[in-house]
Image (cartoon, helix red, strand yellow):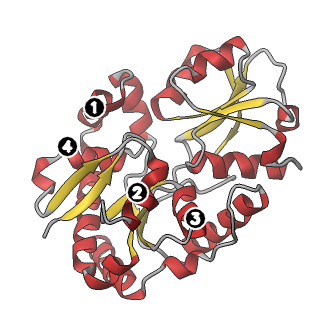
Amino acid sequence: MAIRIGVHAHNPWLHLLSRLDHLLDGIEVHRYADAARTGELLAAGVIDFGGAGSTSSLTAQAARLPVAYAAVSAPRPGYGALLVSGTGPVMTVADLRDRPVSLRVGSWQTHFLAKVLADAGLSYQDIEPRPAASEARFWLRDGVVSGWVAEGAELVEAERSGHFARLRGTAGIIADRSVFHTRASYAESDPEAVAAAVRALRETGRWAREHPVEAARLTVEAVGGSVDSWTTALKRLPWTLEPVTTEVVAEQRAAADVLYDAGFLVARVDPAAAVVPSLNRIVMAELEEVVA
């Protein structure tokens, strides 16, 4: 039986894999719109493998959904940033208090913004989160919102416009990895199938590094934007997979603490409980073979 991978527009890696027919042997594709539903779809058995940012798996754990880590990307220090108007009134993070900020609530952006605010002595509760939309750039330009967490081609285009200032990038704030997970029972019953999905992702990354313009064209077909901007954005991604190491677990534990303190998680969670040793050993061996 084929492994079912979940694909949504906000994970370029999974989207590109879904378009590369030569890598889909033994893989079925299930498309959905909201990345925050990844844990729910895994738990329900709709998909067997999915990916999102640092927040999604923690939200699923807090909701007691049986997710398990499969692999992660290398850190993505240039893919996202918190932008403000280039002409004020927000000049520092502290200036965001009681102001609206546009972001994809429930994604890695929530973790990033909560950490930025905490580092400035504020809380996620001190701002007004506005769910992101395609109009976010114009909201910020026109003063409808005071900050915007942008990523990908939207970040490239916004910074090229000259209308916005980068208040914080992800570098030095969070690792901002793509986090790929599966269902705990699936990890234990068929770890080889999960490893095969990881192998397909690894080859997708290799293809994307070698064909950045074609990767951008495939991305534009799904989410819009320009090929030029997406080529720049996708070149900022590492396209390298890593196993779930103690360092990754520590990063996720720190993220969980930030999100719980921010009032976003309903309970404290231990990311180590979402590591399945038998799966982890197989994935580590798979990825080490490439390094060797």
Q: Foreground mark, 3 or 4?
A: 3
Label 1 environment density (alpha carbons within 10 Å; few <14, some 14–19, many ≥20): some
Q: What element carries label 3?
A: helix
Discs 2, 4 touching: Cβ within 8 Å: no
Percent x, y of residue 125: 81, 46
User: Which residue position is annotated with label 3?
Assistant: 58
Residue 114 visible from this viewpoint = yes
Q: Which mark is residue 19?
A: 4
Q: Residue at x 75, y 29 (%)?
A: 100
Percent x, y of residue 144: 71, 18
Label 2 environment density (alpha carbons within 10 Å; few <14, some 14–19, many ≥20): many
Percent x, y of residue 285: 31, 81
Between the C-alphas of marks 3 and 2, the distance is: 12 Å
Discs 1, 4 touching: Cβ within 8 Å: no
Foreground: 160 or 133?
133
Label 4 environment density (alpha carbons within 10 Å; few <14, some 14–19, many ≥20): some
Discs 3, 4 touching: Cβ within 8 Å: no
Residue 207 visible from this viewpoint = no
User: Which residue position is annotated with label 2?
Assistant: 51
- Farthest residue in the front direction? 44
Foreground: 242 or 54?
54
The image quadrant where one finds the N terminus is bottom left
**Is 19 situated above or below 98?**
below
